[in-house]
Image: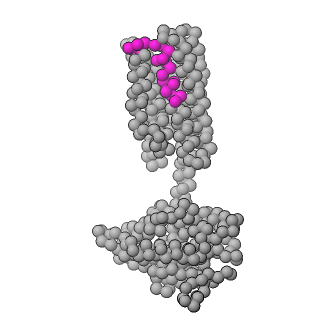
Amino acid sequence: MNSQVFYIIVAMMFASATLSIIFFIAWKTMGEKPHALSWSLGFLGATCQWFLNLISGVFPSHEAYWLTVNAFALILITLGIRGHCQRTDCQRLPENLWPFAALVYAAIVWTTVVDPHTGFRMALVPAAAAGTLFLSALMIIRHREASRPAEWAAASAMVVFGLTQGIAAGMAVLQGPVGDEAYLSLYVHYNFLTLPAGYMAMGMFVIFMLASDISEQMKEIAVRDELTGLLNRRGFNDQAAAAFAQARRSDLPVSVVMADIDRFKFINDEYGHATGDTALEHFANVLNSGRRANDILARVGGEEFALIVPGTELRAAMQIANELRAKIDSQPMLLDGENLPMTASFGVATISAKDSCMSDIIVRADRALYRSKRAGRNQVDLESSQMLRATDGSLKPVTI
């Protein structure tokens, strides 16, 4: 082994070890996501592979060396695509990919020991790598409707690296069954030219994609209530502003329903804060059940929740609030095998010509909520500026 090859292999070994450590740290710090662990173990296998290249002289035969090194290469390839399956929740590929790796390895054994064919045995691993890289890139891009820049970058790097590996496989096949010195030299030079750069680019862009995932996760945490999983006040305000702007642009109604658990302090004092937390989770689940995709539901205070229903006028919003009130009343919380009754009060308001932002509607819905509280709880009310009584006692919205 000449010095240039030695230094390249050493550099690749340490680079693989570094990538393995980075993905392991990511696994430990981002909630032990399985894809990060798969990639960490995959690059650990690659580290072993490059190390075995350094000590190839200790093997009793070239065949033993070849079979061992390629086993570790297939570990990297299989764990690599497995990680992308885990990250994207891919349903098209089977959960267990090891049988496919075993088939490729069986073909390597066959072309190395049983029916030797130099071209095929050297082409199998780069061909498998090319196929899994293309599949991984496809999974990344199809994972969500609008892929993030980091995902496009990682997928692009995989496609380019996959193409170089496919070309390498083609060069390997050109050697024929007994090998050809000219094609072997071309294959070796091409690999040392493209493999390190493609390998490192792919690894770094996957790290970039993982960092993008963590960033999005942090953003999500910042706008989500930890207990109920609903939007918190910050997330609610952002989406509320967008809903108001959309209502103004489309000249469609938008309504707000404010909800508050009745006598929540009594639940906390009587049963403890743990039960209070369970009550909040139960209440959030009931409110969230059956909601439309464009509805905006949030926990905006201790036991106070807000629901924005785009495209919904006042009377329909009143019906939604009444249905929610009835559901809360009819679905008591289960506590130690016993039902704990729960009721809630609701306030409703809809957009008017005078409103300059969603906060104006929320304030009116909040006033209506406290009207229902003062009126005896477990009911739905409107803020006075948006209601009048007909002769039959029904509520009618008015334009203000």
Residue 180 seen: yes
Q: Is residue 239 left or right of residue 61?
A: right
Q: On screen, 265 above or below 281?
A: below
- Magenta-colored span: 112-131
Q: Residue at x 57, y 12 (%)?
A: 183
Left or right of residue 389: residue 25? left
> Quick check: 241 left or right of 14?
right
In the displayed structure, 84 sits above or below 299; it is above
Along the line of sight, the residue nearer the viewer: 348 or 20: 348
Q: Residue furthest front?
A: 392
Residue 192 shows in the view = no
Q: Total marks drawn?
A: 0
Is 33 placed above or below 269 here? above
Tell me if residue 349 is in the magenta stretch.
Answer: no
Which x, y percent locates residue 275? 37, 69
Magenta: main secondary structure equals helix
Q: Residue at x 43, y 72 (%)?
A: 327
Q: Quadrant of the C terminus?
A: bottom right
Quadrant of the rendered structure where residue 326 is? bottom left
The colour style of the image is: one colour
Q: Position of residue 131 (x, y in %)?
A: 52, 30
| Residue 165 in the image, given as x and y percentages of width and height | 55, 25
Closest to the observer, 364 or 266: 364
The image shows residue 98 at horizontal and vertical percentages of: 40, 32
Residue beneath the point at 70% across and 77% down: 354
Q: Measuring 47% from the left and 45% from the top, which residue is drawn there?
A: 89
